[in-house]
Image (cartoon, helix red, strand yellow):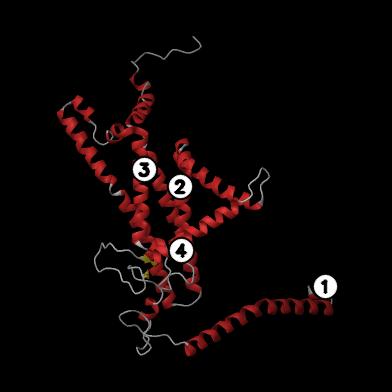
Amino acid sequence: MQEALGPDLGSDAVGAAGAVAETSYRPLILVALAAIVALVVAFIVVPPMGGNEEGLSDPNVPFKYPADAIKANFELPVPHVVWPPGHHSGAGIVTFDVSIPSAILTGWIVMAVIVVLAIWLSRGISMVPTRRQNALEYAYEGLANFATSLGGPKARAYVPIFVAFFTFILLGNWSGLLPFVGRTEQLRAPTSDVNVTIGLALVAFFLFHIEGIRRLGPRGYFGKFFNLGAFRDGISAGLIGLFVGLLEFLLEFVKPVTLSMRLFGNIYAGEIALGVITGLTFVLIPVAMVGLEFLLNFMQALIFSILTLMFTLVAIEGHHDEDHADGHDGAAEHLPEGNIAPDPAGA
């Protein structure tokens, strides 16, 4: 190729390619060198402190690697109390006191961000949509179509609840990936605190039971669990029906436990894993872990919202809906042999 271009032109092309390669790699090399220098200076100017009973805050205790490095990157399950100052949570498993922990404070900040974004994106809605309006409509309609594709037309009435749960949990999950959340005592991802996830699960629990009673009435709703009509087929069938209904009724109280513990376990375990990897390694692997947690947090918000929607749709569905569907599907099976259903055209 160099012979075809001539000696001068070929050498110029090779030199230009080398200059471009050198120019492209030079900023990366400079950034890497600056990061190394900043890390060394940080260890000299602000040396890491060892741990005492209250945390990593005692300069007289030597810093122990990797235990203290791991401990510095995630919080213990008990949240820090922001208000009143100096207040500590009780030692018991279940305590009742008036205080504002770090998870609640961060949850309020997330809610404020959601409200501000909703007001800003919905401001000036018109028939000719702006870019902000297009973004809002695209996000909402995407979630609404996804909900109705799972639950059918009945799910359309619960789309706002589905979107609200998904948005708050998603931003709450992602808040834990910010550098200053979880590294300071005043801020913590809301969904990494079991108290917040239990609260969300209880809201969902009361939601689908109240909707079931409102749609079917108290008799129709509780009749799904305690069906006395089975005694028409005999005492044994009635007792079996009552026993199965009692098990289903008790399983309803397991739903908030599974909802809350699944969300809390995945988010808090992800923070522990990210803290351990950050304490043991340097930049590249923690960045990859943050990308993985970004996707997993999205999935956990989606799972919680989908389960809440599905539980609500199951709660508003009565036995007569299932019986009607079964009777319609099995109508052809009960036709006498040799009989053919009449043709509507009279053929």
Q: Which of the two marks, 2 or 4, is nearer to us in this view?
A: 2
On the image, numbered disc 4 is attached to which residue?
293
Spot occupied by residue 149 in the image (x, y as percentages of width and height)? 49, 41
Query: In the rendered image, is residue 99 in sight?
Result: yes
Spot occupied by residue 178 in the image (x, y as percentages of width and height)? 49, 68
Query: Which residue is located at x 17 percent, y 26 percent?
Result: 234
Q: Left of 98 or right of it: where is 165?
A: right
Q: Residues within 10 Å of mark 1 (few under 14, many from 20)?
A: few
Q: CA distance from mark 4 to mark 3?
A: 30 Å
Spot occupied by residue 309 in the image (x, y as percentages of width and height)? 41, 44
Q: Nearer the viewer, residue 159 or 293?
A: 159
Q: Earlier along the polypeptide chain: callout 4 or callout 3?
A: 3
Q: Earlier along the polypeptide chain: callout 2 or callout 3?
A: 2
On the image, numbered disc 2 is attached to which residue?
162
Q: Which mark is residue 208?
A: 3
On the image, numbered disc 1 is attached to which residue?
4
Q: Earlier along the polypeptide chain: callout 1 or callout 4?
A: 1
Q: CA distance from mark 2 to mark 1?
A: 67 Å
Query: Which residue is located at x 20 percent, y 35 percent?
Result: 242
> Is disc 2 placed on a helix, strand or loop?
helix
